[in-house]
Amino acid sequence: MHLPSLSTGLLAVSSLLTAVSATPGHGVQVTGKHKITPKVFIVSMFAPEAEAWWGIPEFNLLAHNITVPGLSPLFPDVHCTADYSVCQLVTGEGEINAAVTLSSLLFSPIFDLTHTYFFVAGIAGVNPKVTTINSATFARYAVQVALQYEVDLRELPDNWTTSYFPQGAQKPFEYPTSIYGTEVFELNADLRSIAASFARRANLSDSTTAQEYRAKYTTDNEIYAAGTKAPSVVECDVTTTDVYFSGSLLSDAFDKTTSVLTNGTGVYCSTAQEDNATLEALLRAAKHNLTDFSRIIVMRTGSDFERGYEGQSALDNLLYAEQGAFEPAVQNLYNAGVQVVQGILRGWNTTFAAGVKPSNYIGDIFGTLGGKPDFGPGSEQAKEDAGALTKRGTGLTKRSRGVRR
């Protein structure tokens, strides 16, 4: 998730405890031989994102409420429609919450998720070079941009422009040689395009305040031309970092990091706090045939610009600016998202039950699910850089050579 500014204060967390089919206010443990087999599983990260899907005319996600051990203490239940065709959970914010919640769901005996489409739908900061507030973005790549070395800006070499540089590297924007495996995930580009085409049927919400605010991004060189335009549906990529950042220095650094880690293919446009963690859990489940990694969609709607307009400070952009995008961005999770969900349900028998075959590589840098990654140094080299294989000619792994963990 990505709040519009810290000046809005703490949002009240709404209770998600409603009934499976009886008394409101109580989750229910599910037992029995028949597993729940949703066609679409909506992944929300915090209460406003979840609530965007409640009380809508298309379906009732609160018809059933299933308590799943290991989910967030704040959001302990999975919500499903009456026929269980669509379900939803709330991970809690940040990478750790997302990883633990998804893992608990995916390895739960309650569900059969082998044919389920996972639809990550949340708000995010957006890059005005590529898109604008209240737009809906659909990712092919998710990049964990803050998984790097960092030194204090005040202690940087004179010729460095960022305090972040890749692990195992000697300077910024080299490819990391110390690999963890969660740096990049690539999703089904064909499914992404289909989902985006569904979303383009929506009328996206906007606000007068947002319209006035994006006009401030007009420049003579038009570097932020995309940021000045009306909301739209854009196919571009998402970054993940627990660091809630603001300003051109960090934004440009993470933009370049995205390009480096995807071998020049990724286009950074949105920044969130959970997606790589969610995708790692889904990948591990797919490795054990519990999920299908080709059936994942990541949509982020723009709730704020991650950098200021010319002349605006990074702190003002983060703490004080009223961008007018938070509520419309949340509304657009439903506006655009329900088109995606309904498109899958309506086309289930003709297209989606069998799946959408990806024409691109899908998975992680290690090639865990098979295939040849089109980013990184190659799966074998990546495994070696992760310490999974012995270093050539030395008999030493990076762990045994004293690399700090």
Image (cartoon, rainbow, N blue to C red):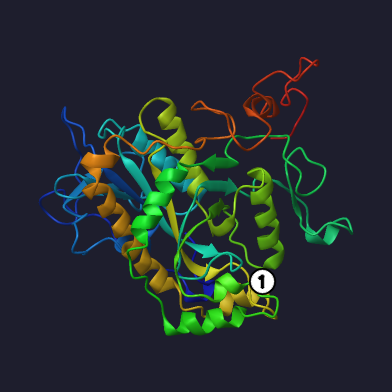
Query: Where is mark 1, residue-wise?
Result: 223
Seen at 67% across and 20% down, the residue is: 389
Relative to 143, residue 310 above or below: below
Badge 1: residue crowd in 10 Å (few <14, some 14–19, many ≥20): few
Seen at 80% across and 15% down, the residue is: 393
Q: Quadrant of residue 180?
A: top right
Of the residues shown, which amino acid type is indicated by label 1? Answer: Ile
Nearest the viewer among 56 and 220 is 220
Seen at 30% across and 58% down, the residue is: 339
Instruction: Note whether residue 38 is visible.
Output: no
Q: Is residue 189 left or right of residue 269?
A: left
Q: Quadrant of residue 106?
A: top left
The spot of residue 2 in percent (x, y) is 50, 63
Q: Residue furthest right?
A: 158
The spot of residue 140 in percent (x, y) is 50, 47
Q: Is residue 321 left or right of residue 337?
A: right
Which part of the image, by quadrant, shows the C terminus? top right
Nearest the viewer among 397 and 389 is 389
The spot of residue 118 in percent (x, y) is 36, 44
Q: Is residue 343 left or right of residue 199?
A: left
Q: How many marks?
A: 1
The spot of residue 270 in percent (x, y) is 54, 59
Label 1 SS: loop
Nearest the viewer among 135 and 161 is 135
Relative to 384, residue 108 above or below: below
Relative to 361, residue 278 above or below: below
Nearest the viewer among 133 and 358 is 358
Q: Is residue 94 left or right of residue 27?
A: right
Instruction: Note whether residue 331 is visible.
Output: yes
